[in-house]
């Protein structure tokens, strides 16, 4: 299966490193940064890879390249999802992305993709992605699902950098200031950005961390799949100091996109800010801490309320020693890579727009386990319900 990978930042590099090991696949990678392409190709140690230097935002101008492939993976930016989905549908390619600008605009395309007998797998990273799969895995042990809480416990400490982003800074800061939603009692409720502060006890070694509600895809796709669920939210580990710092930066205007005059030049403060933050692939080996998610699913079995928590974690140090990247990039990039290999082996049933909950959870967990992502499960019970 001919695979075209768009974007080879830290996550794209992880995807590429997995895909070149699958003899069912041939790989082409595309990025605007020629030096980055050369670096990644060198790291792949002689594996046969075709590279294309082009502006990913102008992918529609390179439709001949698209037509030569069977599947496209967008590891660049969610802002391209809809445009790339249309191009893939036009030229007969399967499609994968890792996150969504607005999943509610992607889901209605399901009928078109089913009619073309093509697969569009969306939101297939760590979270969303593995988080949804963990939710399904836990739910399979329950008779019904009452609530799903997704908690991302990633954190990093660096002696060199005062502020780092473990994935695209542009995507990260957009998530921080978009009004978040939760799902409660049959409808979505909008909250204020950086609200609903909580101290959450992650399993060891992440332990107790402060988390805040963020706008995330799981809140929209999980209730669609689990019809009985009453509550869904997503919260991310953010230190109080970090939250206060970015609030000050925002008030001072450093996160504005609109250009201002500085001397004789017109400059976007946000562009300057993002330029000063190191790229995720530059910080590998220079940070400590962990990436990890815990998905807490509550429901009933024979009148007893059970909470099943499925989780994973990986230290940044181990990720660098074993895989040459940070832990967040490894967890995020491994999921779409193993699912691509599953598609090549006809292990993904159905066509249309497919969310991670629709995949066979056990098969995906087994596949990421073969790539050294360990999955853990813990269960707690409450007293029997009143009859």
Image (spheres, rainbow, N blue to C red):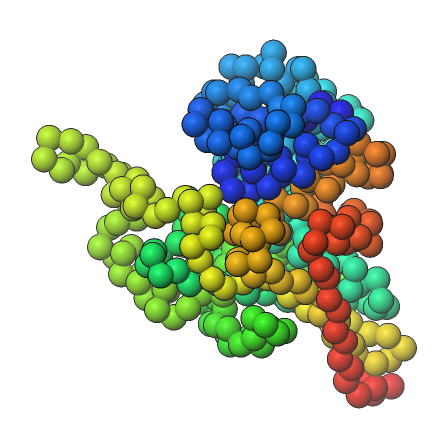
Q: Quadrant of residue 223?
A: bottom right
Q: Looking at the picture, how far across and down is residue 73, in whole percent? A: 63, 32
| Quadrant (top left, top right, bottom left, bottom right) of the N terminus | top right
Q: Is residue 85 above or below residue 69?
A: below
Q: Is residue 343 above or below residue 314?
A: above
Q: Position of residue 293 (x, y in %)?
A: 61, 62
Query: Can residue 118 be seen by looking at this rendering?
Result: no
Residue at left 62%, top 56%?
219
Query: Farthest residue toward the left?
Result: 263
Quarter of the figure with residue 376 = bottom right
**Is residue 279 in sight in this rendering?**
yes
| Image quarter hosting the C terminus | bottom right
- Residue 20 vertical position relative to residue 334 in the rendered view, above or below: above
Closest to the observer, 76 or 252: 76
Q: Nearer the viewer, residue 293 or 270?
A: 293
Q: Is residue 187 above or below residue 27?
A: below
Quarter of the rendering containing residue 121 = top right
């Amino acid at each position: 299966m001919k695979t075209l990978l768009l974007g080879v930042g830290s996550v794209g590099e992880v995807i590429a490193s997995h895909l070149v090991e699958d003899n069912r696949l041939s790989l082409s990678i595309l990025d605007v940064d020629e030096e980055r392409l050369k670096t990644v190709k060198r790291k792949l140690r002689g594996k046969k890879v075709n590279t294309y230097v082009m502006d990913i935002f102008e992918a529609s101008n390179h439709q001949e390249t698209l037509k030569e492939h069977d599947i496209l993976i967008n590891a660049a930016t969610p802002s391209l999802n809809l445009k790339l989905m249309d191009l893939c549908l036009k030229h007969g390619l399967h499609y994968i992305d890792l996150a969504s600008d607005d999943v509610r605009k992607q889901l209605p395309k399901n009928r078109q993709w089913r009619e073309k007998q093509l697969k569009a797998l969306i939101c297939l990273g760590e979270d969303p992605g593995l988080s949804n799969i963990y939710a399904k895995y836990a739910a399979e042990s329950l008779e019904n699902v009452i609530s799903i809480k997704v908690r991302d416990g990633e954190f990093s400490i660096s002696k060199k950098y005062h502020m780092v982003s473990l994935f695209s800074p542009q995507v990260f800061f957009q998530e921080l200031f978009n009004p978040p939603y939760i799902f409660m009692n049959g409808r979505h409720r909008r909250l204020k950005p950086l609200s609903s502060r909580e101290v959450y006890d992650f399993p060891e070694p992440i332990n107790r961390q402060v988390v805040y509600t963020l706008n995330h895809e799981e809140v929209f796709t999980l209730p669609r799949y689990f019809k009985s669920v009453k509550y869904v939210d997503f919260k991310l580990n953010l230190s109080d100091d970090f939250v206060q710092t970015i609030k000050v930066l925002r008030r001072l205007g450093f996160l504005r996109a609109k250009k201002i005059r500085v001397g004789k030049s017109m400059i976007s403060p946000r562009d300057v800010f993002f330029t000063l933050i190191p790229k995720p692939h530059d910080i590998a080996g220079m940070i400590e801490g962990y990436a990890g998610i815990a998905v807490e699913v509550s429901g009933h079995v024979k009148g007893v309320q059970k909470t099943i928590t499925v989780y994973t974690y990986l230290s940044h140090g181990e990720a660098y020693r074993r895989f040459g990247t940070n832990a967040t990039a490894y967890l995020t990039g491994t999921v779409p890579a193993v699912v691509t290999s599953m598609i090549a082996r006809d292990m993904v049933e159905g066509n249309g727009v497919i969310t991670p909950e629709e995949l066979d959870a056990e098969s995906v967990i087994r596949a990421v386990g073969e790539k050294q992502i360990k999955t853990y499960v813990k269960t707690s019970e409450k007293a029997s319900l009143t009859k």
